[in-house]
Each structure stands twice: as structure tokens, then as C-alpha cells.
Amino acid sequence: MQLVTEEVLARDVSNTLIATNSQSGVVSRTPEELANIVSWFASSDGWLNRVRLRKEHRWYERLHHGADYDIWAISWMPGQSTGFHDHGESSGAFFVATGVLEEHRPGEQTLVIPAGKPRSFGPDYAHDVRNESLGPAVSIHAYSPPLSEMNEYELDGSELVPREHASERADTLDREWGAQRPAFANRIVASTIEQVLSAARGRLRRLSPEDAHEAVAKTGAILVDIRPEAQRAIEGTIPGALIVERNVLEWRFDPASSARLPVATDHDLQVIVFCSEGYTSSLAAASLQDLGLWCATDVVGGFQAWHATGLPIGPPNGIR
């Protein structure tokens, strides 16, 4: 993946991803162009380590401010919500990088937005974006012209009414949605394992073996082998990988656990889990995200794919 800098962003987005509007004198991007921008930016490297999780309110930071658009990163803990708002004269788009968000609009069906799909809109578009899942989410947003105005609303029946004291209302919404979580969590809905696996992977930015190897080397990510001892003995190992078997994984990486590992100091730790073929690891990484480790992910294809790629491995250590 490519490291994002202001220079790289300006060059790559303008020259290779979308056409500029300089010939027509227009200095704003269309919703379709903004969707391309957030999709490209979310798949690039160099921004995830700036994201933070905040239980008391949504965290956000502007990562790029150009003449015709700006880009923001936002993190969402379970229950956090924007409240109904528009973006003034700016068009916009957002891309869910990890987790799942919901978009609510008066008189329309709730739209569930999983990781991997952009959502774009024109000026004066009002909506409420929420995280009603049980895990954190991270999204990338772009606005053109750069965001300079937001109007916030109360929902009166099916109509939106401008409201005052917006920040106070936003805090109230966060508390209200947080208070509803226990009822949501207690509902039991039957699912197949394929549905559970698909939902877990929809929350992850899964890494190829090559990308996982690079993340460990360049960003200090923690590669974690969750295979049982018997499987490691037959298949082999990955040098430098931390061995934490699946049955104790959450206790070892929860920063609040008395049984945590010394490396598990905060929720921003990038944990990359792998199993034999990349199935159990997806469920394990989603479980770590439920604990607040929003960077947790897994290796596509697991140890078998790592081996097939030709990356370093150690010999089986239990079979002679």
C-alpha cells in the first residue's frame, strides 16, 4: 500500500484517479468524484495510525485540506451518532473503512453501510449517521467545496426542523443510543456460520500475506499465530509471530484484562491474526474489534497463503 502525504494525495487523486475541472473553472468535485476519492484514500496507507477511539464522543480529524475538497477521518464507538445535519453547499461522500454504519433519513428506510462501499450525496443533503453495531467503526469523508458549514436538525414527525444548541443535542443522542445497546445486545437472531463469517469480514481491512509482512516490518504491527500446538507442529511457524492460541486470545489482548500481555497497552494496537487458512482468524479479529481494538485484522489465506507466497517460515517443531 502507498503512504499518503499531501503531495502524493494532490498528485495521485488529480492525475490518476479523476479528471480535474480546471478547464471549466469549476473548483468543486461531483459526488461521484468524491466517492472515488474516499475509496482511494481509505485503501491507501499512512492514515490509520492517526485514528483514535473516544468513548465520550466521536473522534475526528481533517487529514487533507485542498482548494476544492477536504478529507476527514472519523471513528465511531458503539452507540455514537451525528444527529440529523446537512453540509451546507458542500457535496460529500464517505467510505466505511472498518465496522458498519447506518444512515437515517426522514421517510426513508434505514440504510446499512458495511465496510468497503462509498456513499455520496449532493449539497443540502440531510442525514443522521449512526453506529448501532456492537463494535467500533472508522470512516473516511470528503467534502467539496471544503466543509465550512453544518446545519443541524430535530426530527419532528417526518419533518426536519432546524435546532439550536447542537453540541448539547449531539451529546444527548450519543447517550440515548448508548442506553439502547443492552436491549440490542440481548436479542438472539439465528445465523449460519457463513453469515457470521461474512459479517466479521465485512468489518475488517484484511491483509494479504505481503501486506501483513510489510506492516510488521514498517509499522510495528503484531503478528499473532492462533493455531493450536498440534497444527503448528505439522505446518510450521512464522518467525517473529507471537503465539497466542485462540482460546485465550481476548484475555491476552484486552488492555483491561489482568491476564493481558505486556504489549497490550491500549486499543490502538495493530494486531494481525492468522490461522491455517484464514477462516477462524477472521472471527478472532472481529472479536478483538468488539473489545475496542479497532485496528485488529487477519491474513487472507492464513499460514497456507503465507507459505505459498514464499515469505519466511520456520520448520515444523513437533514432528521429527
Image: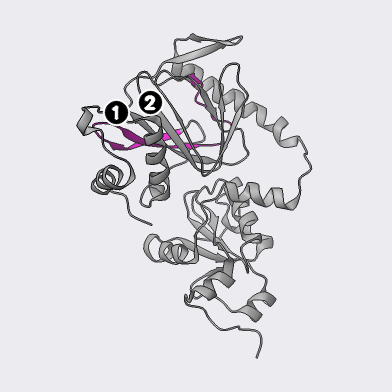
Q: Is residue 259 visible?
A: no
Q: Secondary structure at mark 2?
A: strand
Which residue is painted at 66% across and 87% down in the image? 319
Q: Of residues 93 and 73, which is closer to you in this image?
A: 93
Q: Secondary structure at mark 1?
A: loop
104 relative position to 145: left or right: right
Percent from the top left, x then y, of residue 315? 56, 84
The answer to whether the residues at label 1 and label 2 have Cβ atoms under 8 Å apart is yes
Asked if residue 109 is positioned above or below residue 300 in the image, the reply reads above
Percent from the top left, x then y, of residue 121? 44, 27
Q: Earlier in the sequence, mark 1 or mark 2?
A: 1
The label on residue 91 is: 2
Question: Residue 80: within the magenta?
Answer: yes
Which residue is painted at 64% across and 27% down in the image? 179
Badge 1 local density, few (<14 within 10 Å), some, or many (20+)?
A: many
Q: CA distance from mark 1 to mark 2?
A: 8 Å
- The stretch of residues the image draws in magenta is 59-84
Asked if residue 81 is positioned above or below residue 276 in the image, the reply reads above
Which residue is painted at 49% across and 76% down in the image? 239
Instruction: State the residue position of label 1.
Output: 28
Asked if residue 260 is positioned above or below residue 93 in the image, the reply reads below
Which residue is painted at 50% across and 48% down in the image? 267
Q: For the C terminus, which image quadrant?
A: bottom right
Badge 2 local density, few (<14 within 10 Å), some, or many (20+)?
A: many
Q: Quadrant of residue 61?
A: top left
Name the amino acid, label 1: Ser
Question: Residue 304: within the magenta?
Answer: no
Q: Of residues 248 and 32, which is closer to you in this image?
A: 32
